[in-house]
Amino acid sequence: MKTLKFIDMTLRAADQSRGKELTFKEKLEIARSLDKLRADTIELAPIFDSRVNQLANKTIASMVTTRISAAVDIAAGNIEETWESVRSAKKPKLNLLTPVSPVQMEYTCHKKAAAMLELIAETVKKCRFYCENVEFSAVDATRAEGDFLVRAITTAIENGANKITLCDTAGVMLPEEFGAFVAEVRDKVPALGEIELYVELSNSLGMALACAAAAIAKGAVGVKCTAMDMGYPTMEQLAQLVAARGTDLDLQTGVQVTMLHRVVGQISRILVPEEQEESRFSNVTLGEADIASVCLDKNDEIGEVVKVIRQMGYDLSDEDNAKVYEEFKSLAERKHFVGTKELDAIVAAFAMQVPSTYHIRNYVINSGNVITATANLLLEKNGEELRGVGIGDGPIDAAFQAIEQVIGHHYELDDFQIQTVTEGRDAMGSALVKLRAGGKVYSGNGISTDIIGAAIRAYISALNKIVYEEI
């Protein structure tokens, strides 16, 4: 039994459907939801020259396990930039959007048939240089001249395309006509017997699903779809088709059908038009949980790095922003990508450095699998010794409780991370603590061969920054 491939193009179609571009956060939310469904591919919109779109693609590529397909407009020619934005994906693909009807070739690329074939050969070859998987999407294929369409598809395959999509962009074909169209193309391009063939169908006449069924019967293995109605077949409609006629068509689906309705509901709430309801992301900055997978690289300017830092909750001075960016550049030269965890560590180590109000004198921790963890800490503040005792769910929690007893205040623990920085039995441990106070985030870093000691030092470091600003 064949598995019908669902190629989800919600992120590519959403901007046109809503009449405005998705925000950075909306793109991440939608991608995260789609990833749960295990569709074959999540398709991204062309990035053109927008650094914001490149960053969004890069972040999505790094955080999902589903195959990522980045659309490339053949007229834009920004193949290298598009590839760089998705190269970190586990299964990346480039999708070359190419007009093949006379009107669209003239309007979009200002080229006649012969010149268009040369452009297809050159561009597909360049895509294949960067990426093993290259899809050639014949835009407006149903209105192309038959001989030219065959030559265009053949040229794309000869130069490295290993997936072909036939697009009924106008959406004017009836199911029988589209089925015959797909069969004719397959007959005239023998190489399609070894190539995956997809279809992309406009639902202008309300027959896109029926046309998809006709195409599947003639050999198409994948259908472009969207999570909700955007003028294309929806994922739920395709799932219903497989459920109702899968046996007759010898089809099954790998999509998590049981999760489909809930995920579609989540995406629908994100994409509610403004005139119906104010976006739930209006006046909301991107939170820590939402940008945990952001990836920056050495090409990002200080403004882009500072924007991410602010979205993480930090409010740094221009001087501290400059320090953080300098360390970011140094790290980015050694690492391909820099994420929010690395930015947290940089901020903790190099920004908001203040005189210490609290100093650690000593601490005793008792913990085990048969006793409740306790911590006894002695701190010093302005020459005065202050002792605190805490009981917690583990030694680190107990230590933090003891610190709070000393200072007489509870701060929200926004994040806590530990990792080793050297190897061996005497390895150094690094801890990062982020405390939230007055709507701002303060981070502290601590290093020690004792990871509990590193955590205590990190908490005190963040605490000292809060106290310094409150004085």
Image: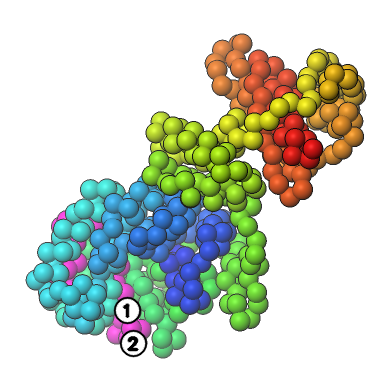
Residue type for callout 2 = Val
Residue placed most toward the observer, 150 or 434: 434
Instruction: Look at the numbered discs 2 and 1 and tell me whether their residues touch, using CB distance below 8 Å.
Output: yes
What residue appears at the point 72 percent right and 34 percent down from the top-left corner? 465
Q: Residues within 10 Å of mark 1 (few under 14, many from 20)?
A: many
Left or right of residue 238: residue 356: right
Q: Secondary structure at mark 2?
A: loop
Quadrant of the drawing holding the N terminus: bottom left
Q: What's the residue at 61%, 43% (across, down)? A: 316
Residue 87, horizontal then vertical, whole percent: 37, 47
- From the viewer's perspective, is residue 23 above or below residue 421? below
Residue located at (90% from left, 34% from top): 408
Q: Can you give x and y, in whole percent of width and height, for residue 11 in the image?
A: 47, 65
In the figure, is residue 32 to the left or right of 47? right
Reading the image, the residue beneath label 2 is: 172
Q: Which mark is residue 168?
A: 1
Give the residue type that dot 1 points to: Asp
Taking the magenta stretch, the answer to whether it contains residue 165 is yes
